Amino acid sequence: MNASERQFYDTYIRPHQNGPALKLLLFLALGDASSEEPFVLSYRDLAQRVGLDRHTLIHAVRRLSDFQVQGVPILERVEKGRGRKSSVYAVHLPKVGVVDK
């Protein structure tokens, strides 16, 4: 485990091993969201896929958006338009070395 992976694990995963943010992170890492393209799903659809309540998912997204590895955010809002399905997020797991491309 390199230094960035150790920092990621110690800072984020270890304190929240059973938390909703970890569940969301694993879903993103193992699914199509780990590609270079922005991940487009409504909170409701993503919550159903991950198996979380929508409000719990929103909180988990905010926590992942605040966390950075080597200055690169794990999850970044790249678009914010109008309406209910307006937020588009980019997942930067390959860039921070959490998953391979």
Image: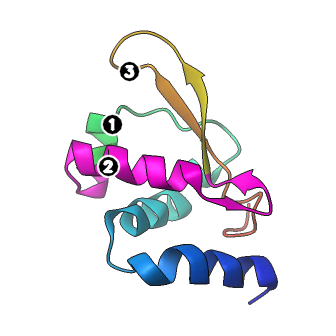
How far separated are the C-alphas under marks 2 and 3? 15 Å
Q: Which residues are magenta?
A: 48-74
Residue that numbered label 2 is attached to: 57
Tell me which numbered mark, 3 or 1, is placed earlier along the sequence.
Answer: 1
**Three-letter code, disc 3:** Lys
Tell me which numbered mark, 2 or 3, is placed earlier along the sequence.
Answer: 2
Residue that numbered label 1 is attached to: 43
Pinpoint residue 44: horizontal percent, then vertical percent: 26, 36
Q: Quadrant of the N terminus?
A: bottom right
Residue reaching furthest bottom? 1
Left or right of residue 57, residue 9 in this image: right
Residue that numbered label 3 is attached to: 85
When the figure is inspected, residue 67 is found, relative to residue 15, above or below; the finding is above
Q: Disc 3, disc 1: CB below 8 Å?
A: no
Count of numbered marks: 3
Q: Secondary structure at mark 3?
A: loop
Q: Quadrant of the C terminus?
A: bottom right
From this viewpoint, is residue 97 visible? yes
- For image coordinates 69% across by 85% down, the residue present is 6
**Three-letter code, disc 2:** Leu
Pinpoint residue 36: horizontal percent, then vertical percent: 71, 44
- For image coordinates 76% across by 76% down, the residue present is 4
Query: Is residue 43 found inside the magenta-colored segment of the image?
Result: no
Query: Is residue 49 found inside the magenta-colored segment of the image?
Result: yes
Left or right of residue 56, residue 1 in this image: right
Q: Disc 1, disc 2: CB below 8 Å?
A: yes
Label 1 Cα neighbours within 10 Å, binned few <14 / some 14-19 / many ≥20? some
User: Looking at this view, is 100 or 82 the one in front?
Assistant: 82
